[in-house]
C-alpha cells in the first residue's frame, strides 16, 4: 500500500525526523490559510500516488498566501498519470544548500532491508545509479540487531564529510529505520535530504510504501489508505478480497492464482488479443467472489468478451460455476463468455453450467483462442 | 528417487486442527504421506481423526515421533514464530504454506532457520510432492504421475496447469516443488536445480518463473555453469504492467527491473528451452528426454 507524502511526513515527524512545517489542503482556501500560518515562501505539492509530480506541473512555489491559493487551485483537480489530484501539501519551502538521497528498501536478494544513500540527491536516483554508481552506498541491515550506531555513522559520513552534519544525518538514518520497521514498510525514502544555508539537515520530501501483509496488525496504518486516490474498480475488488489491475485490452479475465492469471493474460496476447485486466479470485473461492468479479469486469465498457480460467485445487470449480449462474441471473451478460474449468468437482461444475445454458471447456489454449476470437469479432487467428 | 521428500518422510502438521490444516492433513494421509504428529497449543494429548497424536509444541512432537519434516498451516501473524519453532525443534525440512506472512518477519526467520541447518520451503507456497511416494502441502495428488521430470515453480495454480498438461501427455515427475511467490522465501530455484542435478532419476527439469526480482536470471546462470541435465523455462507476466509493487528503488538494488523479457533472454543465453505457452513444455521436455 502506498501512502501520501504528507502521511509519510507525519509518521517520520513522530520518530523525530526534522521536517519543515506543512499541512494538507483539499481546497485553495485551505492552502491559502496554511501558507499564511507558515508565513514564508511555501511549496504546493500534489498528493497523488505517482512519480514525476514535478515534471507534470504538480509542484509549485508560492511567495505569498494569495499565490499559494492560485497555485493550489490549478493543481487541485489536475490529472497526473491518470490520477486526479484531490489534495495538496503546503509546506515551508526551505532554502537548500545541498541535496542528498536516503532510502530503505526491502531487498529480495539479500533478504534484508537495505539502506541506499547518495550525496547526489534531489534528482532521479535511477539516473545516479546508471551514470555514477560510485555515488551510491548500499548497506544491508540484519533486522535481529537493527541499524547499529557505527553503521548509521558510516552512512552519515558517506553523505557529509563534516562531522556535525554526519552525526545529524546518522540520527535521521536511525529514525528512518525505526519508522520503517515499526510501520511494516517495504520502502521508506527521503529525497531530498537537504542541508539548509545555516547548516541544518532536514527532510524535504518523504515516501513510504507499506507491505500489505502488515495491515492486519497495524490498523492505524491501514486507516491511512486513501481510496479516493485509487481506481474505483481496484477499491471494489480489494473490498471483495480480489486482486484486480485494470489494463487497456478488451478480453476480461477471471482466473484463480496470480501465476495462472498472468499466464492467461500472456496467452491472450499470444493469440492476438489484449487482456482488459488482471484478476485473481484467490485460492479458496466462494460463489460470492465470482459474483463480485463479474460485476467489476462487466462494468468496464471496453470488455468485449469474458474469459474464465479456473484450475481447481483448493478452489472448487462448482463454486465458480454457481457464482457465474447467480451473477448472470442478477445481471444478464451483454458480452459473450468463455468458461474453462478443470479440477476439483469439475463434473458437478459442468452439469451446473450446462443446465443453465452455458458451455464449459477444459483446454486452456482452446478457451483463450475462443475468447480472443469473440472479442475481436472473429478476426483474430 | 526424488528430491527433498520420499517414502521415509515423516511429517508434523503445525495447525492440524485448523480449517486448512485439517483438510489438507486428510488429503496428505489419503495420498500416503506419513503424517506422524500434529501441533496445536492447548490440544496436546488429543488425537486428530482418532489417529494422529496432537502435541502442544513442536519440540515435544519432534522428540516423541522423530519426525524430520514439518508443514505449517497457521495464520499469517503466527507463521514466522511457527517456522522458527520448527527449526529450533530440529526438524530438517519446514514447509510453510501460509499466505500473507509479513515480509519483515521473514528477515528474522530466514537467518534463524539457516543457522539451525534446516531447509525452509515457502512461505506462500503449495508445498511439494514426489508422485507415488509422499506429498507435503496442498498440490493435488491426482494431477501428478511418477516419471523423470523435476518441476520447480514460483506459483501455485500455474504449476498445477503445467504438471497436469505433462501428466496428460504421459510425462511423469520425480518431484514437483512450489517455492512460493513471496519476496523472501527459504528455498530458491538454485537449491532445487542443485537437488535435481544430483537426483539420479531426474532426467530433465521444468522451471516456471514470474516477473520481479532476479531469481530466474540467477537460475539461468546456474544452469549454464553447473547443470548437465536439460532445463526448460517459462516466465509468467509477459503482459503485466511494470512496477506495480516495489517501484524503482528495489530494481536499482537488484540491478534489474525483473521484466519477463530480461528473464527470457537469460534463459536463452543459458541454452535453456523456452516455453512461450504452458503447453509448449510438453514438446520441449519430450524432445529432451
Image (tube, rainbow, N blue to C red):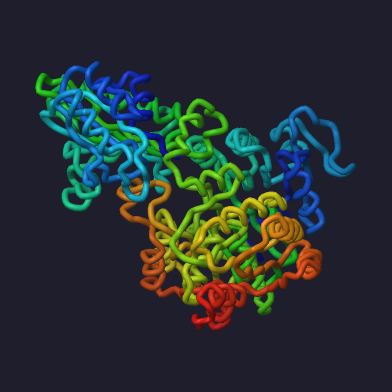
Give the vertical position of A133 relative to A256 (above or below): above
- The residue lying toward the viewer, choosing from B68 and B108, is B108
Q: Where is residue A28, by image quadrant?
A: top left
Q: Where is residue A30, by image quadrant?
A: top left
- The residue lying toward the viewer, choosing from B189 and B180, is B180
Residue at x 68% of width, y 79% of height: B170
Residue at x 21% of width, y 46% of height: A55
Taking B268 as reference, is B5 left or right?
A: right
For the image, the number of numbered tags is: 0
Is there any visible trace of residue B7 in the rendered image?
Answer: no
Q: Which x, y percent locates residue B76?
A: 61, 38
Give the vertical position of B52 relative to B142 (above or below): above
Taking A295 as reference, is A1 left or right?
A: left
Q: Quadrant of the C terminus of chain B?
A: bottom right
Is there any visible trace of residue A324 in the rendered image?
Answer: yes
Q: Which x, y percent locates residue A81?
A: 33, 50
Q: Where is residue B143, by image quadrant?
A: bottom right
Amino acid at each position: 500500500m502506498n501512502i501520501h507524502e504528507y502521511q509519510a511526513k507525519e509518521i517520520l515527524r513522530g520518530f523525530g525526523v526534522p521536517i519543515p512545517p506543512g499541512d494538507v489542503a483539499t481546497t485553495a482556501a485551505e492552502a491559502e490559510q496554511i501558507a499564511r500560518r507558515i508565513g514564508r515562501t511555501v511549496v504546493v505539492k500534489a498528493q497523488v500516488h505517482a512519480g514525476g509530480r514535478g515534471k507534470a506541473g504538480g509542484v509549485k512555489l508560492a511567495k505569498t498566501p494569495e499565490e499559494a491559493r492560485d497555485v493550489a487551485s490549478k493543481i487541485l483537480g489536475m490529472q497526473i498519470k491518470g490520477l486526479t489530484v484531490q489534495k495538496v501539501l503546503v509546506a515551508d519551502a526551505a532554502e537548500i544548500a545541498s541535496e542528498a538521497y536516503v532510502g530503505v528498501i526491502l531487498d529480495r536478494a539479500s533478504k534484508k532491508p537495505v539502506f541506499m544513500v547518495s550525496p547526489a540527491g534531489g534528482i532521479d536516483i535511477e539516473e545516479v545509479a546508471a551514470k555514477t554508481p560510485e555515488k551510491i552506498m548500499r548497506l544491508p541491515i540484519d533486522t535481529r540487531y537493527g541499524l547499529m550506531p557505527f553503521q548509521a555513522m558510516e552512512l552519515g559520513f558517506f553523505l557529509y564529510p563534516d562531522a556535525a552534519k554526519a552525526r545529524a544525518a546518522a540520527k535521521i538514518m536511525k529514525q528512518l529505520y525505526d519508522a520503517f520497521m515499526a510501520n511494516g514498510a517495504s520502502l521508506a525514502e527521503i529525497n531530498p535530504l537537504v542541508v539548509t544555508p545555516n547548516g541544518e539537515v532536514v527532510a524535504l520530501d518523504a515516501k513510504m510504501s507499506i507491505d500489505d501483509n502488515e495491515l492486519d496488525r497495524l490498523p492505524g496504518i491501514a486507516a491511512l489508505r486513501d481510496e479516493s486516490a485509487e481506481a474505483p474498480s481496484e477499491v471494489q475488488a480489494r473490498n471483495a478480497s480480489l486482486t484486480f489491475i485494470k489494463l487497456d485490452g478488451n478480453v476480461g479475465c477471471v482466473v484463480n492464482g496470480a501465476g495462472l492469471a498472468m499466464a492467461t493474460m500472456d496467452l491472450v496476447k499470444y493469440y492476438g488479443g489484449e487482456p482488459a485486466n488482471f484478476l485473481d479470485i484467490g485460492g479458496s473461492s466462494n460463489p460470492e467472489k465470482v459474483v463480485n468479479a463479474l460485476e467489476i469486469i462487466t462494468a468496464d465498457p471496453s470488455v468485449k468478451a469474458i474469459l474464465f480460467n479456473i484450475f481447481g485445487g483448493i478452489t472448487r470449480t462448482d463454486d465458480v460455476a454457481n457464482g457465474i449462474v447467480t451473477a448472470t441471473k442478477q445481471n444478464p451478460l451483454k458480452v459473450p463468455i468463455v468458461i474453462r474449468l478443470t479440477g476439483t468437482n469439475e463434473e458437478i461444475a459442468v452439469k451446473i453450467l450446462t443446465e443453465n445454458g452455458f458451455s464449459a471447456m477444459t483446454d486452456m489454449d482452446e478457451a483463450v483462442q475462443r475468447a480472443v476470437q469473440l472479442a475481436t469479432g472473429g478476426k483474430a487467428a | 528417487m526424488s528430491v527433498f521428500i520420499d517414502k521415509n518422510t515423516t511429517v508434523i502438521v503445525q495447525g492440524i486442527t485448523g480449517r486448512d490444516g485439517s483438510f489438507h492433513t486428510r488429503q496428505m494421509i489419503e495420498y500416503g504421506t506419513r503424517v506422524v504428529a500434529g501441533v496445536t497449543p492447548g490440544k496436546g494429548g488429543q488425537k486428530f481423526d482418532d489417529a494422529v497424536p496432537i502435541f502442544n509444541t513442536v519440540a515435544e512432537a519432534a522428540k516423541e515421533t522423530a519426525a524430520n519434516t514439518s508443514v505449517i498451516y497457521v495464520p499469517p501473524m503466527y507463521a514466522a514464530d511457527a517456522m522458527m519453532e520448527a527449526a529450533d525443534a530440529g526438524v530438517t525440512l519446514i514447509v510453510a504454506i501460509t499466505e500473507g506472512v509479513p515480509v519483515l518477519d521473514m528477515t528474522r526467520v530466514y537467518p534463524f532457520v539457516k543457522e539451525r541447518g534446516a531447509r525452509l520451503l515457502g512461505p506462500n507456497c503449495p508445498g511439494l510432492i514426489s508422485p507415488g511416494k509422499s506429498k507435503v502441502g496442498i498440490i493435488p495428488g491426482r494431477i501428478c504421475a511418477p516419471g523423470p521430470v523435476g518441476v520447480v515453480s514460483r506459483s501455485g495454480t500455474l504449476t498445477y496447469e503445467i504438471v497436469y498438461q505433462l501428466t496428460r501427455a504421459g510425462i511423469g515427475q520425480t518431484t514437483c516443488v512450489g517455492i512460493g511467490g513471496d519476496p523472501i522465501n527459504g528455498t530458491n530455484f538454485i537449491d532445487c536445480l542443485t537437488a535435481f542435478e544430483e537426483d539420479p532419476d531426474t532426467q530433465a527439469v521444468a522451471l516456471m518463473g514470474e516477473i520481479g526480482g532476479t531469481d530466474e536470471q540467477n537460475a539461468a546462470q546456474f544452469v549454464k555453469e553447473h547443470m548437465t541435465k536439460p532445463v526448460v523455462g517459462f516466465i509468467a507476466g509477459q503482459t503485466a504492467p511494470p512496477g506495480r509493487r516495489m517501484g524503482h528503488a528495489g530494481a536499482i538494488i537488484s540491478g534489474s527491473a525483473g521484466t519477463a523479457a530480461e528473464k527470457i533472454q537469460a534463459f536463452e543465453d543459458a541454452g535453456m528451452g523456452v516455453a512461450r505457452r504452458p503447453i509448449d513444455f510438453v514438446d520441449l521436455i519430450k524432445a529432451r528426454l
